[in-house]
Amino acid sequence: MSGWRPSADLTVLRQRAQLLADLRGFFAARGVMEVETPVLYGAAATDPHLASFSADYGGPGAPSGRTLYLQTSPEFAMKRLLAAGSGPIYQISKSFRNGEVGRRHNPEFTMLEWYRPGWDHLALMDEVEALIRQVLATPAAARVSYGDLCLQYLGIEPHGADLAALQAAAATLDIVAPLGLDDDRDGWLDFLWCHDVEPRLGSDGRPVFVVDYPVSLAMLARLRPGPPAVAARFELYLHGIELANGFHELADGIEQRRRFEQDNAQRRAAGLPSMPLDEYLLAALDHGLPDCSGVALGVDRLLMLLTGIADIGGVLSFPFDHC
Amino acid sequence: MATFSTSEFRGGLKVMLDGDPCAIIENEFVKPGKGQAFSRVKLRNLKTGRVLERTFKSGETLEGADVVDMDMQYLYNDGEFFHFMVPDTFEQFATMPAVMGDAAKWLKGQEMCIVTLYNGQPLAVAAPNFVELAVAETDPGLRGDTSGGGGKPATLETGAVVRVPLFINVGEILKIDTRNGEYVSRAKS
């Protein structure tokens, strides 16, 4: 059978090895502990836009079988470590997302995730920037709010704009909207964002931190009172590639349970299966998660930016269509 | 006709969009960090030839288009219609000049063409990539000039006009690339 050879050049794989060593060196120098948490885990992300792979265990310890989920990120388990008093931690691990194959997506990918107790997301952004500048030798990053970018490129005020205003913006920009978005306001925001904003971010080689996300896109971030109220969330973009996503982490177990259940309600409404809630995480939050910020960074995409390779297959030994 | 979801979209798939048959050129999966996944799709409208870009929500479907490409032999033009035949079955198809597009000016008869059928009717015709045609009219050849630089117009036996090197004369048979309408070489006889 042909096609057995690696999809990435061996020189790129050597760059990958060096990058991993450099990342570990960065955190070692800063006293952040490397940890490992289960890739196969009993609970899964509830986010309706994330699809987890499941796997069936059979044998001692679970005579009637047990369903485990390949983690979409190591977030839940790492927060349990933080609640147990681990202090600052990082992990470089494989994460898995079903249904995601494309030029920047492989269903199995390498994620760098780290947490800083006692830091807010603004302080963490500075550390992300230090890492990016060390690895990619980029100029100083810009910091722009989600709202300002939407005003600039879409002519909308995203925190207050209603569905009709988003649809009108699409019409003004002469973009044919996708079928089936219906009255999904966040879906319209995502559509306008990835059609007309995202490709421009960092196109001049200067990294861009997007901050102050709309509350509806808060995910696991804290909210900051307004007006307008915003989510304490940031994303890092370079050359139109989304590289990292960070939060000032939500530490309220009751609010977290409410968001999980809201996600599952959305899943059911969309005909998707509900996911089991991570009761361990919720118990850890009830026990007390230290005030902390965390960020997840795509290592394969970082390597794409480092090597100038536009397709993720060019930086993986054996991507989806070769494994 | 079958329907296809975004995850089945791939180059070459024929689908219906806004009532017209289209061929997918490329399909790119895009997903903002934590949000909705989309397919950014480039399509060619098979009626107009125009290329368009559309974004679909992941999981949306399009109806397949009843479009097939068939190898057919060009027979003749009766002054109104162009006639083609499927060699295996001898089934014949007549197409209007509008459907022929650029292909018409390269055909004199007998050539194997690709005829695209939509709901059983010819929708587009692609001439063979290379044809060999005689020069009907051109300025006299310049003796001694074999460089091929410069060039001059030549009218071929089908009426098509191509740019040819200065040394080409009336009556010579030329090999032409129909995809860009350019002279390739003299035909080897």
Image (cartoon, rainbow, N blue to C red):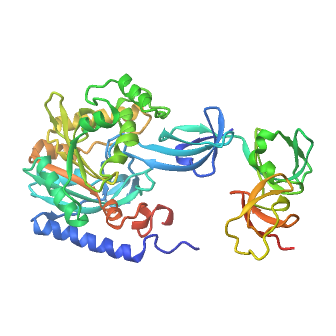
- The answer to whether residue B44 is above or below residue A315 is above
Numbered disc total:
0
Inspect this view and state whether residue B36 appears.
no
Q: Position of residue B60 (x, y in %)?
A: 52, 38
The residue positioned 56% from the left and 48% from the top of the image is B8
Q: Position of residue A278 (x, y in %)?
A: 25, 45
Of the pair A3 and A228, the residue shown nearer to us: A228
* B171 sits to left or right of A135: right
Q: Position of residue A144 (x, y in %)?
A: 21, 43
The residue positioned 16% from the left and 67% from the top of the image is A26
- The answer to whether residue B94 is above or below residue A294 is above
The residue positioned 62% from the left and 42% from the top of the image is B50
- The answer to whether residue B31 is above or below residue B88 is above
- The answer to whether residue B13 is above or below residue B187 is above
Extreme residue in the left direction:
A118
- Which quadrant of the rendered structure holds the C terminus of chain B? bottom right
* A42 sits to left or right of A121: right
Q: Position of residue B100 (x, y in %)?
A: 78, 44
- Which quadrant of the rendered structure holds the N terminus of chain B? top right
Inspect this view and state whether residue A93 appears.
yes
Of the pair A145 and A22, the residue shown nearer to us: A145
* B47 sits to left or right of A296: right
Q: Quadrant of residue B21?
A: top right
